[in-house]
Image: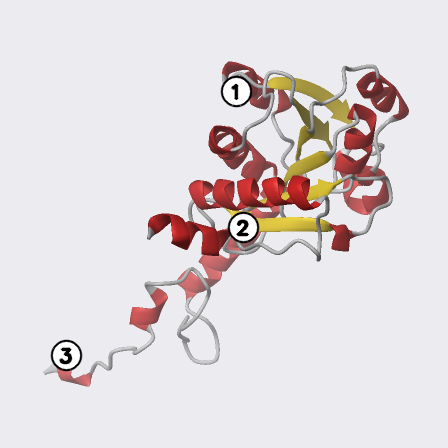
Amino acid sequence: MMSDLTQSNPWDELRAHTSARIALGRVGSSLPTSEVLKFGLAHAQARDAVHRPLDFAGLREQLDHAGFRTLHVCSDAPDRPTYLLRPDKGRHLQDDCYARLSAQAPAPELAIVIADGLSSIAVQRHAVPLLELFRQRFDTNWANTPVVLAEQGRVAIGDGIAVALRARLVIVLIGERPGLTSPDSLGLYLSYQPQVGMMDSQRNCISNVRPEGLPYDLAAHKLDYLARQALHLQLSGVGLKDDSDLLQIKQSD
C-alpha cells in the first residue's frame, strides 16, 4: 500500500511545541514553497513592526480610560528614519520636553515610561494590559504617578524623564527588536536612581512579554518583585537578582 511507503517525520511532534523554524523539510536542494512563503510573511511582519508608527493618541485614550495620568514627550529624533539611523538621538529628550517635565509636580517615587522602540505593535497590544496588572500589585500613589509616552524613544530616554520628574525609580515599557517568530515582544526595563548616561548593567530587564512568551500575570509578578526590591535595597542592575520565581513557589505552597 502507498501508506507503507510514506515515512513519518520524527520532528513533527517537536514542531507542535515551538514556533522556531525546525524540520522545514526540503524539495530537492531547496525548501518547500510553503516554508519560503511563511518566511517571507514573517520577514514582512518584522519590518512592519519596526516602521509602523505607534498610535499615541489611541494609546493615551486607553490609558486615560484606565485611570492613568499621562504625559507626552518626544526624543531628539524628529522622524522614524532618523530614529533608526541615529540611536543616540532616541536616548535623549527634546529640550522643551525636559523643561515641561521639570515643571511638573515631583513623581511620588515611580515614573512609568512607554516608548515605541522597535515594535509599535508590541506596545499597542501589551502595554496597557501589563500596566493594569502591575497596578493591582504595586502599592504607590497611582493618582500622581505619571505614565510618560515617549515618541521615537530608546530605553535610555527613561533616565532623563526620571531626572526631570525627580523619581527614585523608572520603569520603561518598550517594543523590542522583532524576530521572525515574535514581531510583538514587549520589554520592561527598571532603573533605580537613574541618571543620564547610566550603563545598561545598572538596569534590570524583563523581556518577551506577550501571551505567546512571558504572560502578563507572570511579567507583572516579576516587575512588582524587582520594583519592591530596588526600592528596599536601593539598587538595580547586576546587583539586584530576580528571585521572583522562588517567591511565587513559596506563595503557592
The residue drawn where x is 40% and y is 73% is 23
> Mark 3 or 2, which is nearer the eye?
2
Residue 187 percent across, percent down from the top left: 60, 45
Query: Left or right of 128: which side holds 166?
Result: right
In primary-sequence order, the first of circles 3 and 1 is: 3
> Mark 3: which secondary structure?
helix
The percent position of residue 54, horizontal first and vertical second, equals 63, 30
Residue bearing mark 1 = 62
Tell me if residue 186 comes above or below residue 32 in the rendering.
Answer: above
Tag 2 residue:
208
| Relative vertical location of residue 151 with respect to residue 64 in this rendering, above or below | below
Residue 3 tag number? 3
Compare residues 156 and 224 and report the one nearer the observer: 224
Question: Which of the 4 quarters of the picture holds residue 223?
Answer: top right
| Residue 69 placement (x, y as % from top left) | 62, 17
**Residue type at mark 2?**
Asn
Marks 3 and 2 close (CB-CB < 8 Å): no
Q: Which labelled disc corresponds to residue 24?
A: none
Which is more N-terminal, label 2 or label 1?
Answer: 1
Q: Quadrant of residue 109?
A: top right
Image point 38% across, 48% down: which residue? 251
224 sits left or right of 31 in the view:
right
